[in-house]
Amino acid sequence: MTDTIRVRADDPVGRIAPEIYGHFAEHLGRCIYGGLWVGDDDRVETEDGVRTDTLSLLSDLELPVLRWPGGCFADDYHWEDGVGPREERPRRRSLWWAQGREDEWEESNAFGTEEFLRVCREIGAEPYLAGNVGSGSPGELVDWAEYCNHDGDTEHARMRRENGREEPHDVRWWGVGNENWGCGGRYDPESYALEYRRYANYLRAFERVLGERCLELVACGDNDPDWNRRFMETLGESGAIAEIGGYELLDHLSVHRYYEAGDAVDFDEEEHFRLLARAGEVGRDVDRAAQVIEEFVPPGSVGVIVDEWGVWHPEAVPANGLEQTGTVRDALSAAGVLDDLNARADVVTMANLAQTINVLQCLVRTDETDAWPTPTYQVFDLYRPHMGSEALRTDVETDGREVAVDGDTEEVTLLSASASRNEVGVFVTLSNRALDAREVRIELETDPGTASARGAFDGQAPESHATAEDAEDFAPVERSVDLDGATAAVEVPAASVLAVEFEG
Ligand code: AHR
C-alpha cells in the first residue's frame, strides 16, 4: 500500500511558536558539569570554561529557547550563589542530583546566571529561567528578575554591572517553580495557586518598574486535569486587586511527560511500537490542559507549555546521572511528538526536550575529548524550517499497528507527519515507524515550483545509536523526490525520518 499525506492548505492551525523546538538543561549529572562547563580542564577547547564543541553543535541547531537551571534542582537553587567571583561562590548541597561524573551531591556554583546567559547568547537561544518556589521566596525571585532585566541604579542592577554585564539581559521567560506537586514543594493545587499568586504578583508588579508588559509567566501544572482545574479555580478566586486579577498573573501553564517501553537498546518489536504509542501522550496532555484552561479564560490568553518531555529509559537512574543510550527509535518518537505539537500550534506556546547534553533524551553526548550529536539531534535539524511557520492540517492515510498500553489496546500509525507554510513554500516532515520501507504520496492543493528532500537514518536499525566515531552516519542527506503536478512521491526507508520542502 502507498501511504498518503494530504496537506490542507485551506486549513491553517496557527503559527508554530519557534519555542516548541526548545530544550532544557538542568544541573544534573553531566548535563552542565562536564557536558557544557569544564572550567580550566584543558583536554578540550573552551571559551571561558564552556566547551566549544558542545556550543558549536547547539549553535548549528538554532535552539530557540533553553530552560535552566532545573527541574527539581530549580526549587532549591539560590541564584545569588552563582554570581560574582567564582572563587568566592559557596558550595552547596545538591538535594536532587549528583553533579558531574562522580557521586558528588554538591553544587560548586561555578556555572551560574552569567555563564548560562552567555551560553544562550552564543547559541542564539532565549533563556527561560525556572524560579525557586519550594525553598525560595518571592523576594528572591523578583531580585533575580531585577538582576537580569533592570537598567536602573538598584543594588541588583549594580551587581550585574560589577559582574561584567552593562546592559540588561532582558530575560522574558520566567517559570514560577517546577513540578510543585512533587519535588518543588509537594503542594496541593489550591496551595500552589496561592503561592503562584504571591510569586507572580511580584514579577508582574516589577513590569511596572521595567515600564512594559514584558515577562512571560509560567505556572506549573500537572497531567491530571483535576489538578489543573483546581489550580485555575483557586487562581481565579484570587483576583482581589482589580488591576492585577488572578488570571492576569498567568501567561502559560506547563505540563511534563516522560515515557518508556522496554530497555533503551534491547527492546522487541512490540516495545518498539509501544514507545511510539506512548509518545502520543504528549499531544493528548496538551489537549487536556488546553481544555481545562478554556473553561476559565478566553481562547489564546493562556498557552500550554510542555517544558519537559522525552524518553526516560529504565537505565537512566540518579546513580548514573540519568544517562541513557539514545537510539533511532527515540529519534522516531521525537519526530512523532514534534508532528503532534505542530498540529496543536494554536495552543502550544513552548516545549522543551529533556535534557540537552548527556542526560535523558539529549541532543549531544560528550566524553573528555569529544562531543557528538545523537539521532534525536538529527530530527531537530530536519524539522528546523517549521519554526515560526504556519501549521497546516494534514490528513494521513496509512496502516496501524495495535499495541498493549497500560492495560488497553492502542493503534499506533506507521506514518507520522506534519506540514507548515512560510514565505518559501510548504514544508512537510514525516517519519516511517515501520520496520520496512514505505512509498508515500504527498498531495498539495496547488502545484509547487520545485521539491527537494532530506532524510536521516537509511539502513540504521531502530536500536542503533551514534558514537563519537560514527555520528556523521546519522546526519540527514539529500533524498530523491518525484514531483508530478501537485503530488510528490517519495520512498521512505524503514524506521527513518524525511523532510520535504516545496518551493513556490
Ligand atoms: O528531567 C529530570 C527530572 O524530571 C526533573 O528534574 C524533574 O522536573 C522531572 O521529574
Image (tube, rainbow, N blue to C red):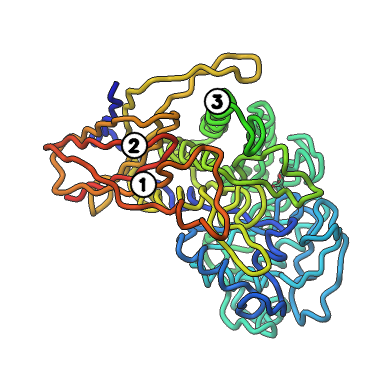
- Name which residue lies at 69% across and 30% down: 227
Sooner in the amino-acid sequence: mark 2 or mark 3: 3
Q: Which residue is mark 1?
A: 455
Q: Which residue is mark 3?
A: 269
Q: Nearer the viewer, residue 330 or 265?
A: 265
Task: State whether residue 410 is above or below residue 275.
Answer: above
- The residue type indicated by label 3 comes to Glu
At mark 2, the secondary structure is strand
Q: Nearer the viewer, residue 211 or 420?
A: 420
- Classify residue 264 by image quadrant: top right
Given contact means CB atoms under 8 Å apart, are the residues at marks 1 and 3 in contact?
no
Relative image position of residue 300 (x, y in whole percent): 46, 40
Q: Which residue is mark 2?
A: 492
Given contact means CB atoms under 8 Å apart, are the residues at marks 2 and 3 in contact?
no
Task: State whether residue 14 is above or below residue 467.
Answer: above
- Name which residue lies at 38% across and 20% down: 399
Q: Could you tell me which quadrant the N terminus lies in? A: top left
